[in-house]
Amino acid sequence: MTLLSPPRPALIEAFSAPKGFGDQTLRDRRPDAIELLGGIPDPSVLPTAELAEATARVLARPGAPALQYSRTEGIPALREWIALREGVDVHRVLVTNGGFHGLAIAVQTVLERGDLVAVDNPVFPLFLRGLELADARVLPVRVGAEGLDVDALAAQLRAGARPAAVYTVPEFHNPSQSSLPTARRRELVDLAERYGFVVFADDPYRELRFHGEPESLAPFHDSDHVIHVNTFTKTLGPGLRLGWVVLPERLIPDAVALRSRQDSHSSTLVQAVVAELLTSDETLFDRVLGRARTLYRSRAHTLAAALSASGSFEVTVPEGGLFLWPRLTDDTVDADRLAADASAEGVEYQRGSFFPSGPGTDADRHLRLAYGDTEESSLREAAARLGRAVARQG
Ligand SMILES: Cc1ncc(COP(=O)(O)O)c(C=O)c1O
């Protein structure tokens, strides 16, 4: 079996540095620079005014209970809202400080030191950082046009691989856009039950679907071998640091015991404000999503069309999420030089090679372009600059 090389810490630092908080950003050096780096929600579609009103109402409650300690699992009003949305019993919901924290809880609840973990190939790099907590070994499994290649995983299992967990982003994969169809989810869960591993289904982009119905969560929720990890980061704002995990019954006691030994619980105030926001107006969340989906769909289509027109990229128009994963059409283009030339042209993105990948993918021939927080005129300009950067190698 082929193991993945460890993540490169400097690159992970670069990936996780939020815009505006870094030392010197490209925009400082070049004011007209266009950054397509992170999957960041656009401030215009976050419910800022509604959050301010909800905060005022919560703090006006007699005795200000939102300023007190609360239960490790989360406050009831928020857990009930999440449980309804997920379609699970409320006691399976554990509120977290965002998706990354949910992954850390999954890792620490399930893994023993040195365990093998099968992961998306290419993979969201911060998950690998979370795995360092468990000193885990990593087995890459290719992600294709239909998400994690469950047949490839099955072949690895037949060949003797015994992962304790499988990590995948099942909907609008980061970085490669694809989604795992419902039938494939069932096959993945069947493998989990047969071979005894736990699936960490990391789902922050699920709600950002541009067309049609989301893939079913039932295969995940019907199994006692899946932890479903989600977050309000992409819908209400990453600064809230609020998310949740849906746990299988048998893992609840360990996860809650772990959490009570960490920080005891997520901020009561943030939970209370979000619960107030979501329950005081039952249609608000769907209205927020509606605005976000319309904006991101339009931006995704604009960027995809502009890049296709340049002839330098093969593009699959995204069906949701915040990323475009175009592939260079010309295999002689040097992808590292392209990133440097693009930076000189004033456009910054994540190179495909930034995402740790094992054999069997061509991630290094791709670019990951985040379009969520960039206006359409700038996206067209970014595509033109990328076209010029490719042409420099002609
Ligand atoms: C695949 C994936 N998982 C988890 C996260 C982390 O989410 P959060 O900001 O809620 O910790 C992200 C954020 O970009 C992500 O892309």
Image (cartoon, rainbow, N blue to C red):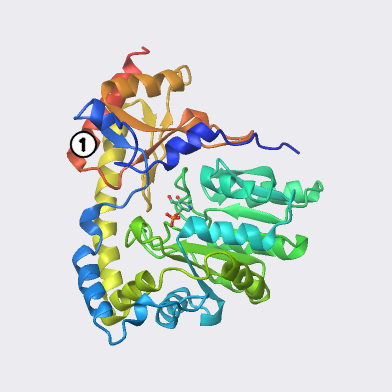
Disc 1 crowd rating (10 Å Cα; few below 14, some 14-19, many 20+) is some
Relative to 58, 359 lies left or right = right
Residue at 49% x, 70% y is 265
- In the orientation shown, which residue stands out farthest toward the bottom? 62
| The one of 146 and 35 positioned closer to us in this rendering | 35
Can residue 89 be seen by looking at this rendering? no
Residue 374 drawn at (x, y percent):
24, 43
Residue 162 drawn at (x, y percent):
77, 52
Residue 311 drawn at (x, y percent):
33, 26
* Quarter of the image that includes the N terminus: top right
**Mark 1 residue element:** helix
Residue at 53% x, 42% y is 125
Residue 94 drawn at (x, y percent):
52, 72
Residue 264 drawn above or below residue 156? below
| The one of 112 and 294 positioned closer to us in this rendering | 112
Residue 393 drawn above or below residue 295? above
| The one of 50 and 336 positioned closer to us in this rendering | 50
Residue underneath mark 1: 378
Relative to 87, 293 lies left or right = left
* Quarter of the image that includes the C terminus: top left
Residue 71 drawn above or below residue 130? below
Residue at 48% x, 58% y is 99
Q: Amino acid at mark 1?
A: Ser
Relative to 236, 226 lies left or right = right
Relative to 391, 49 lies left or right = left
| The one of 315 and 143 positioned closer to us in this rendering | 143
Q: Which image quadrant for residue 377?
A: top left
